[in-house]
Image (cartoon, grey):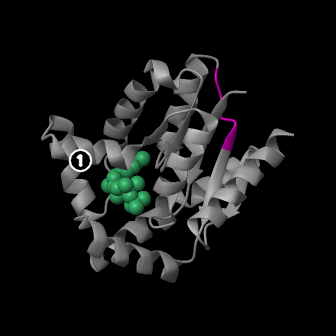
Amino acid sequence: MTARIVLLGPPGAGKGTQAARLAKRLGVPAISTGDIFRANVAQHTELGRTAQRYMDAGEYVPDEVTNTMVADRLQAADAAEGFLLDGYPRTEAQVEELDRMLAESGQSLDAVVELTADVDEVVARLLNRAVEQGRKDDTESVIRRRLEVYLEQTAPLVALYEQRGILLGVDGLGTMDEVTGRLESALDRQER
Ligand code: ADP
């Protein structure tokens, strides 16, 4: 079975951890736009320079920049049989662009998984991560802005995918293993 899956959810919901685990189990690459941007920042590429300004402020990188990067990544051989997208699409324009990219090769999404978590919990997790990993965009004011941008621009995508009948909601609270278990059973149920 192909697995073309999108993982949606607020910053701090645990998408990165779960995406890596799930991708491994499904045998597809986990593609995290945040990780790709951070790698570009670390390598001082042109893309990294562009992205950094937005990331440091908690704003989204412009759609054209993000879309081009994802289109490139999805053309790599390892994504031919599937992928798990973590952090993309985050805007309606990105949804349209992803639809277009997939349609070009006769593909479509199999599932969109929304990892839910309440705001107090995600802020606490992100502040904790700031201490552990020292990410520059994990300060309290930038975290607040990231959540605002999420609610404004990305939360509406949940309804959009729900209308398409491919949305699976999964509770992101609990231990990492509990959440992984819920994700796996939600996807198994959908398959049947
Ligand atoms: P989080 O979800 O915890 O905020 P990510 O690592 O997924 O962290 O993303 C970090 C930053 O990278 C975002 O705040 C944003 O600036 C940028 N980014 C990631 N994905 C996208 C996207 N699809 N569109 C625009 N910007 C993005």
Instruction: Please give the residue where the numbered disc 1 appears in the rendered image.
Output: 51
Write the residue at 31% across / 37% down. Answer: 65
Write the residue at 68% across / 27% down. Answer: 2
Q: Tell me if 67 is positioned left or right of 111 in this view.
A: left
Q: Position of residue 13 (x, y in %)?
A: 51, 66
Residue sitting farthest toward the left: 44
Write the residue at 74% across / 43% down. Answer: 164
Q: Tell me if 187 is positioned left or right of 132 in this view.
A: right
- In the rendered image of this protein, does residue 130 appear above or below residue 120? above
Magenta range: 107-111
* 109 magenta-colored: yes
Q: Position of residue 158 (x, y in %)?
A: 64, 56
Mark 1 lies within 8 Å of ligand 1 (Cβ measured): yes
Predominant SS of the magenta segment? loop
Q: Tell me if 76 is positioned left or right of 41 in this view.
A: right
- In the rendered image of this protein, does residue 86 appear above or below residue 177? above
Residue sitting farthest toward the right: 192
Badge 1 marks a residue whose secondary structure is helix
Screen quadrant of the N terminus:
top right
Under mark 1, the amino acid is Ala
Q: Quadrant of residue 43?
A: top left
Write the residue at 38% across / 67% down. Answer: 146
Given residues 21 and 113, the one toward you in this image is 21
Q: Position of residue 174 (x, y in %)?
A: 61, 73
* 7 magenta-colored: no
Q: Position of residue 60 (x, y in %)?
A: 34, 54
Residue 60 visible in the picture: no
